Structure formats: C-alpha cells, structure tokens
Image: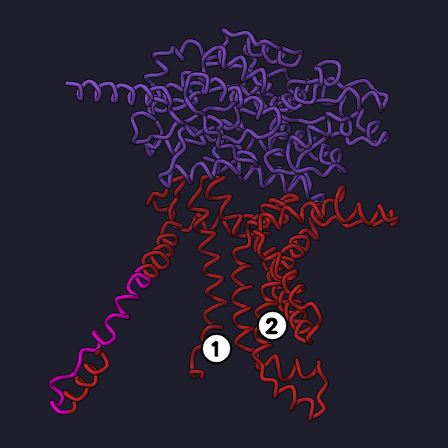
Amino acid sequence: MKLTTKLMAFSAIVSASSASAVELEVMHWWTSGGEAAAVAKFAEAWDASGNKWIDGAIAGGGDTARPIMVSRIIGGDPPAAFQFNHGRQAEELIEAGLLLDLTDVAEAEGWADIVNPPSLLDACTVDGRIYCAPVNIHSWQWMWLSNGAYEKAGVPVPTNWAEFTETAPALQEAGITPLAMGGQSWQQNGAFGVMAVALAGEEAWLAVNRDKNADVVMGPEYARVFEAFGAARELSAGLNVQDWNQATAAVINDTAGAQIMGDWAQGEFAVAGKVAGTDYSCLPGLGDVAILSTGGDAFYFPVVDDAEITAGQKELAAMLLSPPVQVSFNSAKGSLPIRGDVDLTTVNECTQKGLDLLAAGNILPAGETLISPDTTTQLNDLMTEFWNTPSMTPAEVQEQYAAIIADAD
Amino acid sequence: MALSEAAHAGAQTEQGGPSHKPVRLFKNISAKIASLPMVFTALVVFLGGTIWTVVYSFTDSGLLPRLRWDGLDQYERLWNSRKWLVSIENLAIYGVCSLIGTLVIGFTLAALLDRKVRGEGVLRTIFLYPFALSFIVTGLVWQWILNPQLGLQSVVRGMGWESFTFDPLNNSKIVMFGLLIAGLWQGTGLIMCIMLAGLRGIDEDIWKAARVDGIGTVKTYIRVIIPMMRPVFVTSLVLIASGIVKLYDLVVAQTSGGPGISSEVPAKYVMTAMFGGQNLGQGFAASTMMLVTVVIILVPWAILEFGGKKRG
C-alpha cells in the first residue's frame, strides 16, 4: 500500500516535470546586434513558460545556415525548430514528410483569421496543411539614408532614386561613398530586385518573377533597371565591406550616404541609438513606388519520434504568434508583426510608414516565395559577378539574366 | 604452434602429392578476416558512394535525391556556367602555384635547418605551428592581415610609406594570390618536416664523398640528394595535391568566393549548388567532373610511378 502511494507520487512528479520543462533546440541565423536582441525575446518568453530554449545560432547568414540545418534534418539529427524564409526553401522537406504538420495548432489559435497579410500563411501551406509559423514581415523595399552624411555634403536628403543619383557627386566630393553595398552576393541581387520594383514597376516585376517571362527582362523597362544598377555600381566604389550590417554601420556613422537593404537594417540603427527622421531617413520602394514585399521569417518544426518534444514544438509555435511575443520581438528587430491586431510599443517614423503601406494593402509577394533557391543562386552569382566586374556591361548582364529566367522553374 | 602446423602441412604435401594442396583462400586466414572491415568500407563507402554520386548526377534531384532522369542536362548547365569555368581556372592557378611554392619553400627551409643551425627545434616548431590551425582560422587571420584598414597596408602606411597599396582580397585579379599566401603559410611547415626527415635519412657518407670529390653544397643537393629523396617527394606531392583539390574552407573563411565570383573554387561550387541552391543533381555533376579530372591526372602518374617494375 505504502509502496504504491510512493510509486504513484513518484510517477506524478516525473510526469509533471516532463510536462513543464521541454528543452528545445532552435536554430537560426540571427546574429547581428539587432537580430540577437530580438531572438532573445523569444528565448525569454519560452524560458518564462517553464521550458528551456537552447540557442543554436549560426553566424554567416542564411546561405551558411540553411545547408547546416538541412544536413542535420536529412542526417536524422534535427533541431526542434529552425528558421527559414518562408516560401520555396522548405518545399521539398515538406514533400518528403520531414516537417511537422501544424494544422491543428493553426486551427486552435485561429491563425487563418489573425495572420495579415494572408499570403504569409499561404506560403506556409502545402496541400491545405500548414507547416510553418510565420513570425514577422520583412520587406526588401527600403533605402536607408544618413541625414548626417547629406548634411556634411551640403545637399538635402533625397526623396527618390533620381534625386539620389543627382546628389551622389556632392557626396563623393565630401569624401562619402554614396551607396553602401556589402560583398555578399545576396545583397547585390536583393538590391537589384528593389530597384526593379521601383524603376520598372510592379507589373514588369511580377511578369519576370512570377510568370518567368524572359521577354520582359529584355524589354525597355528592365533595360532601364540594368542601366541604373550599372550606375549604382560606380556609386559604391571605395567601400569594401562584406556583411550587410557592416554596410549599415557605414551609413550609421556617416561614411556612406545610403544603403538599399531590407527593414532588418533598422534594428542596427536602433542598437546604435539612432532616431528615425532626425539621424536617418527611410524610403520605402526607393521613394518611387510605395510598395512593400511581404517576405519574412518563419519557424519550421522537424518531425521527431519523441511525443514530448512534439508537444513542446506545438506549444512553441503557438507562443511565437501570441500578441505579447509578437510585439516584443518585432519591436526589437525592426520588422512588422504578422498580425494586424497588435500595436507595437515603439513605433518610429519608418515602421509607421511600413504599417501604413501594409494597412493600405500596397503589398507584393516576396521574391523567395516566387523564385526557387536554385534560380536564386544563379541570379546571385550573376549579379555579384556584374557588380565586381567593371568591364561587364548592363546589356551583357541583361541577356544572361533573361537566360536564367527562361530556364527557371 | 601455427608455424609447426604449417611446416607439418608442407611436409604432408611433399609426401602426399597433388591430392592434398592447401586451399589458397584459407592461407593467412586471420589476417584476411582482420582486413575484412576495411575491404567492406572501401567497397561500400568509397566505391559505392562514388557510383551513387555519379548515377544521381544524371537526375534532376533537388534538395533530396530522387531518381528522375535528366540526361546530360546537369552537365550542360555546368559547363555553360561562368562560375564553374572561373572555379576551374582558379583551382588551376592555385594548384600550380601552391604545388611549386610549397615544395620549393618546404625544401629550402628543410635544407637550411639541416645545416645544423642553432635553435633548430624552436624554428621547426615555429614553421610547423600554422599547420595546427584549421583552414577556417587561417583564413580569418589572413583576412584581417590583408584587410587594408587594419592589416599590413595600414601598418606600412603608418610607418611613413603613405602610397603603399596592398589589398589583394578586394582585387579580383590577384585575389587567388591572397588565398595562396594563407595556404602556403599554413601548409609549408608540414612539408618542411617531411623533407627534413628525408634529409636526415641520407647517409653521412654521401656528404663526405661529395666533399672529397669537391662538389659544391648546392650542387650536391640538386644532383645527389634530391634524386635520392624521390619517395619523400612523392609523399609530399600526394599530400599537397589532395589539399589543393579539396580547397574550400580557406576560401569560405577568407573571401567567401568574392569579390564577385573571382575566388570561387570547384568544391565551393559543389557545396553552394547542393545546399544553397538545393540542387543536388548539379552538385553531383560538378563533383563527378572533379573526380574525372583527378582520375585523368592520377591514373597515368600512378602507372608510371608504381606500375611496371617493382621497387626494393
């Protein structure tokens, strides 16, 4: 009798402790100052719920981190959760049945009603089942300008691309590099995408990226973009940095005039204590076409045998989308929340511009939901070659770009 | 015991004639059993893996391998890719320079140490030490040293030579030599040690005979010592060559293929295609081409070196 009670008490303790403390290893590539501050909010919230967040940060950006994550998943040693950009990157992992179906969590939490824009949830959906938890909206469509640099050069801060190129010589005279661009290939390809939306217009961009229409690449709208991109190449000479946040740092400390980079750059400005509007300015869509692409980050959860971990994974998925976590995370990261029903605590001028565009529905699907990683790699290679080979003409790169688009799946 | 048994068996065959021949398969049976795991590994892991890779290079495998035939499409795309052509060119430049550089510097250092200099132990440790570092660390260290803002260039400028410019990592024409410096710094120490061991193996009498004949030191090295060290050179060659083909981590750490695609190498092409681009088929095609190249170079050389007459 006594023994039975003891055993029962013991098993109760065991089950209680196992239910409350799930250790989940979460892999991501958020390592810059602003990003690390943001992911710490997730970890705090998860630890506060009595569980344990094991941080698996991988330095070097998505191109470095994704292969490591994929090889761990395929190799049978998956992390409990991992970050991807939602879209086509996880397509095959889902088809192979390696990722956890989150449809029951999504239904219980009513994700279909709260996730705004709905395209984010569509990007997580394959055959009607939901496989990822979107956590933020990121948009490439931004140019960040240093007010201090333009003050030094004695010219007003530009409000569109044409003004930017006109004022560039004044900056160069003052010893400032007009355009900060890091050496990694995705940065050059990404900046080109932003310029394509701004200078060729939404329709042409969709025809190329969604419909894979190579004729449009060879058309007059895109020709203008390639010309402008060639001109931008000259404006970035003199600043040799690799990582995007080093390029952002150049804008922060006024050694460069501007950077075309997604809204994650704003986290760096925040960490450096800069104020939007007074220290730096922002132009969505380069000031020409006020529109946001709605890409972003999402968490995927590999299938594991352990029922306890599976329960933990679902609990974590629900937590990532809960209002307080959404607010604290996105405030730190400079990204926009994926639900329209929360108010960010610290909304600065730039974030407000983004929220307004989102509310007005001026949105585009993100490039990575339209273009496969294979094609993206080819485009990255092409654009970085162009950027670093002064002898390569815009006409040459245009032709090769069209060839890649024609072959794209 | 085994010996006596064998002797006994031998005696039996002599007596009993052809009817009692021992089966060759069971000769040295324990040694054969012991080598089975290695044979298995060689067949399944090396040969099997290679065949598997070659087969799947003819498919359109994406993130995961799948047997959907794609003919020669992957190879066609490979050889139309600018990046692949640049990669091969870079590997050729790096390979030739690294092979010659490592052998010349390694042998020279070894020969100098062999002249019974003072503090040989200390110098040997210093030269060998970089080999203890991984390529990633080597790459990062040299990225900093060659960084114009905080490395070599700024030091020289700080000493008063204001116009000094040395920025190989941001110049696509000479970036491979920036990698080469790091590679040589890391790799020559080991080759030096192997060469030194070879030099120590040369009989003192050879030197005495050379001195009696009045042959100069340099000439003795070139005409007498180096030909005698042929096996040592072969070992060094294999070590250096395998290091060249697998060149990857140094590039990733030091330049990540940049500026642009000017320091891409084949191994990095394979990795990017397979994991970055989620296109296994393309990566397999590229690695198959790497294998073919190595085989084309290796087989004739191996036949020349090891085939025909037996040594020793």
The residue depicted at 21 percent of the width and 79 percent of the height is B1
Q: Residues within 10 Å of mark 2 (few under 14, many from 20)?
A: many
The residue depicted at 41 percent of the width and 39 percent of the height is A72
Amino acid, disc 2: Leu
Magenta segment includes B22: yes
Q: Nearer the viewer, residue A217 or A66?
A: A66
Against A251, is A242 above or below?
A: below
- Which residue position is annotated with label 1? B304
Query: Residue B147, percent across and down?
Result: 72, 44
Q: Nearer the viewer, residue B233 or B2?
A: B2
Give me the disc on residue A292.
none
The residue depicted at 59 percent of the width and 9 percent of the height is A345
Magenta segment includes A161: no
Query: Residue B172, percent across and down?
Result: 69, 48
Report the side of A53 relative to A155 (left or right).
Answer: left
- Which residue position is annotated with label 2? B196
Chain part drawn in magenta = B15-40
> Picture quarter containing residue A396?
top right
Image chain in red: B
Against A55, is B253 above or below?
A: below
